[in-house]
Image (cartoon, grey):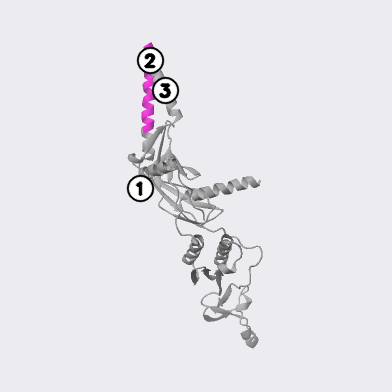
Amino acid sequence: MTRAASVGPWGRLKARMLRRMSIAGGEALHHARLMILPTPFGLFWAVLVCMLLLLGINYENSLAHALAFWLFSLAVISIFRSWRNLAGVRVQLIADGEAYAGGELRLLVRLSGRARARAIDVRLGDSRQRLEIHAGEGSAPMGLPVALRGQFTLPPLTLESRWPLGLVRLWSWVAIEMPVMIHPCPQMPASPQGSRNTLEQVEQGDFAGLRRYVAGDPPAHVAWKHWGRSGELVTKRFETPARPSLWLDYEACHGDMEQRLGELTARVLAAEKSQATYGLRLPGQTLAIASGGAHRRRVLEALALFGGERVLPWEVQQQAVASRELAGRAKT
């Protein structure tokens, strides 16, 4: 795990502004949290209006006056429409599946509010999407590259609009109070690992009787003794399907800490795919043999947080991604 770098004066000022000006996720945007600045095109528009007004005054040209006031009125209406485009919008961010180090964190951003809103830019970290609200709702997927395992706070989400004429830029920050879990990168070893056998036992379940053999039944479930006595081929029925039980042991893996955690993550996914029950042994922590989605989440969370359980800021993740990309470019 990597520690966050020291934050400079500009970083502290920006963090203070974010705390004071941002809204919470699910809260409707209102005028006190909407910031506005003219765009370069908006500044050009203002200069053009002033020049036309001066031209009309100096030359007593009514057409220049009319054009100046028409452009000014159009700008005022555009600013008002831009404000209405964002006012009242609510943001919801939903995690879309599990994220693993070295991959991508997938999120679904959902906007709701007025019956229709146009050309709203949503920016989260280095990811950017343009959304429109139709019938009161709009949504789009977003992806953030990740390089480290652990629990992280998401960066503030920025909503921005320059619609309809691009004269002004309105934006607001949304604080996402949802820490995300990044699991270790799953990686199986190139050769079979070590001396310990991870297969502990086989659960056959409760015997529930016999049934007629059907092509495709596993040979291990065929009642061969009954066939030898009666010549009738039948299959054993169990109340629960046979499933292997595994112990996934940190000490049985090879390599450094991240390699061991990556191997255990890969074995968890393989056990889930084969519908096996499994337990986890980590130094100082043991999770009993079980199965199901809740057990899978507990095991993956234990692997993600092993060696450090505090929530880290997203800047740490961004620095790690930038370092990985820089190292990749250096290799090529």
Amino acid type, residue under disc 2 in the picture: Gly
Dot 3 or dot 2: first in sequence order is 3
Left or right of 78: which side holds 243? right
x and y, in percent, of residue 133 in the image: 42, 43
Which quadrant of the view contains residue 222?
bottom right
Residue 303 x, y percent position in the rendering: 51, 62
Give the residue at mark 3: 47
Instruction: Using a 10 Å C-alpha cutoff, classify the residue at mark 2 as few (fewer than 14 neighbours), some (14 to 19) or many (20 or more).
Output: some
Residue kind at label 1, given as amino acid type: Glu
Compared across the picture, whether 102 is left or right of 137 comes to right
Secondary structure under tag 3 reads helix
| SS label for mark 1 | loop
Q: Which residues are magenta?
A: 57-79
The alpha-carbon separation of the residues under discs 3 and 2 comes to 14 Å
Amino acid type at circle 3 is Val
> Alpha carbon of mark 1 to alpha carbon of mark 3: how far?
37 Å
Q: Specify whether residue 114 is in view.
A: no
Give whichever of 27, 110 is nearer the camera: 27
The answer to whether residue 4 is left or right of residue 325 is left
Residue 65 belongs to magenta span = yes
Q: Quadrant of the C terminus?
A: top right
Of the residues tagged 3 and 2, which is closer to the observer?
Answer: 3
Residue wearing tag 1: 27
Instruction: Please identify the residue farthest to the bottom as the structure is shown.
Output: 229
| First in sequence: mark 1 vs mark 2 | 1
Mark 1 / mark 3, whichever is N-terminal = 1
234 and 115: which is toward the camera: 115
Residue 56: which disc? 2
